[in-house]
């Protein structure tokens, strides 16, 4: 399972439309821009899944980490989100 892109603070992502098809190349261009409800909301959702046994059978839960678009310190963004999300991911590795 993949929880998607999590940024430290909520952000809306890029203006819509943000997905484009290129039929001649059989391609899709994704310009979502890390639309995210923020690290705290992601943590609550992951904790809720753990509490109700959603991953009791094991498996891997991945969380993609992103910096906020307006951030001036990407390292600070990642160091804020990693410890917040990691406990919920590591608990599900079989």
Image (cartoon, rainbow, N blue to C red):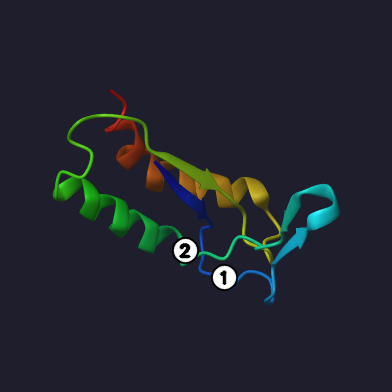
Number of other residues with Cα within 10 Å of mark 1, as a class: few under 14, some 14 to 19, many 20 or more: some
List the residue tagged with mark 1.
11
58 versus 83 height, above or below:
above
Q: Position of residue 91 (x, y in %)?
A: 27, 33
First-in-chain label (2 vs 1) = 1
Q: Secondary structure at mark 1?
A: loop
Q: How many marks?
A: 2
55 versus 8 height, above or below:
above
Q: Nearer the viewer, residue 69 or 59?
A: 59
Q: Nearer the viewer, residue 48 or 2?
A: 2
- The quarter holding residue 93 reads top left
Mark 2–mark 1 distance (CA, rounded to whole Å): 7 Å
> In the shown orientation, is residue 45 left or right of residue 2?
left
Q: Nearer the viewer, residue 72 or 41?
A: 41
Query: What's the residue at 58%, 73% (across, down)?
Result: 12
> Dividing the image into 4 quarters, which one contains the C terminus?
top left
> In the shown orientation, is residue 3 left or right of residue 32?
left
**Which disc is residue 28 wearing?**
none
11 versus 85 height, above or below:
below
Q: Residue furthest left?
A: 52
Q: Secondary structure at mark 2?
A: loop
Q: Position of residue 53 (x, y in %)?
A: 15, 44
> Decide: marks 2, 1 in contact (CB < 8 A)?
yes
Q: Position of residue 67 (x, y in %)?
A: 62, 54
> In the shown orientation, is residue 92 left or right of residue 81?
left
Query: What's the residue at 36%, 31% (across, down)?
Result: 60
Q: Position of residue 3 (x, y in %)?
A: 43, 49
Q: Residue furthest right?
A: 24
> In the shown orientation, is residue 7 left or right of residue 69?
left
Query: What's the residue at 14%, 50% (across, down)?
Result: 52
> Dividing the image into 4 quarters, which one contains the N terminus?
top left
List the residue tagged with mark 2.
38
């Amino acid at each position: 399972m993949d929880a998607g892109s999590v940024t430290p603070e909520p952000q809306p992502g890029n203006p819509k439309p943000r997905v484009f098809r290129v039929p001649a190349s059989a391609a899709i261009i994704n310009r979502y821009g890390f639309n995210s409800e923020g690290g705290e909301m992601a943590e609550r959702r992951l904790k809720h899944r753990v509490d109700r046994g959603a991953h009791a059978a094991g498996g891997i839960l991945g969380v993609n980490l992103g910096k906020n678009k307006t951030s001036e310190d990407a390292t600070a963004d990642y160091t804020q989100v990693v410890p917040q999300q990691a406990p919920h991911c590591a608990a599900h590795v079989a």
